Image: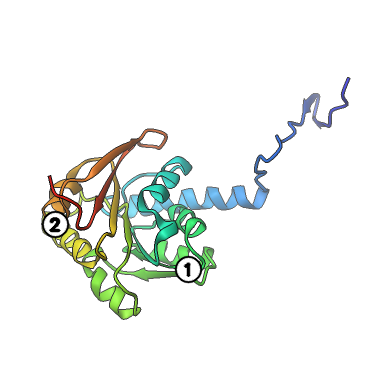
Amino acid sequence: MHQREEVQNKNRVMPLRQPEAGEPVASGASLANKLAEKIDFLHGFLRHPDQVGSVIPSSVWLEQRLVNATRVAEARVVVELGPGTGGTTRALLAAMHPAARLLAIELEPAFQAHLIRSIRDARLTAHLGSAEQIIQTLTAYRLPAPDAIVSGIPFSTMPAAVAERSAAAIAAALAPGGRFVAYQVRDHVVRYATPHLGTPQQQWEWINIPPVRVFTWTKGALRL
């Protein structure tokens, strides 16, 4: 019979589960950081529910789907609109080339400050601003047209005029052959982006709270 480590909790004896081979082990510090991020994200949603797409950050499954859809491993420049507390930002950076650049544009000052404080990566620029100004922001940082733009900003709750200007700016900013990937609870983004980029591909990510649709456009692709 194999001997097991045990920890005594008052009058109960609870066996400690041993991690499987290759299974990541979360430290107390990392769990505390994740909890703090969720709390920060909720506070941001409560302050500006029209600017934040969800009550909690994206799931790891959604993050991986976005990494695959944007093809960031092949990109030189990536723009993230609405990075929030940085879960998706970290996933993008983990998949990007060491010489690539990520411009994260965030409208909520608390989220932008959190990104600067919590992510130490020379490839990341966390900018406080609007998606409408994406071209001006790229110019200000001397970045070329992005190969991918990923967006979690809720097109369903922003004013129609802002949504139209944002979609037009995104399409104009993309490099030829570049990909615009938007993850949304509702499909309002389609009506704004389709006139500029054509009909998107659509996938569902069910393992997320709430489940979201992931729309992907390719600039210059055949329009249906």
> Dot 2 corresponds to which residue?
196
Q: Is residue 196 left or right of residue 207?
A: left
Q: Residue at x 21, y 45 (%)?
A: 200
Residue at the (47%, 49%) spot, across then down = 39
- Residue 109 on image: x %, y %: 37, 66
Label 2, residues with CA under 10 Å away: few <14, some 14-19, many ≥20: some
Residue position for label 1: 116
Mark 1, Cα crowd under 10 Å, few <14 / some 14-19 / many 20+, is some
Secondary structure at badge 1 equals helix
In the rendered image, which quarter is residue 20 located in? Answer: top right
Kindly identify the residue that appears in the image at 35 percent across and 78 percent down. Answer: 141
Residue drawn at x 52%, y 68% as measured from the top left:
121
In x, y percent, where is residue 62?
A: 41, 43
Left or right: residue 201 versus residue 59 is left
- x, y percentage for residue 51? 28, 54
Give the image location of residue 33, x and y in percent: 57, 53
Which residue in the rendered view is the most extreme toward the front?
222
Instruction: Check residue 162 in the rendering and tell me which mark sits there, or answer none.
Output: none
Seen from the viewer's position, the closer of residues 162 and 122 is 122
In the picture, the quarter occupied by the N terminus is top right
Specify the quadrant that holds the C terminus.
top left
Q: Quick one: label 2 or label 1, which is nearer the N terminus?
A: 1
Q: Identity of the amino acid at label 2?
A: His
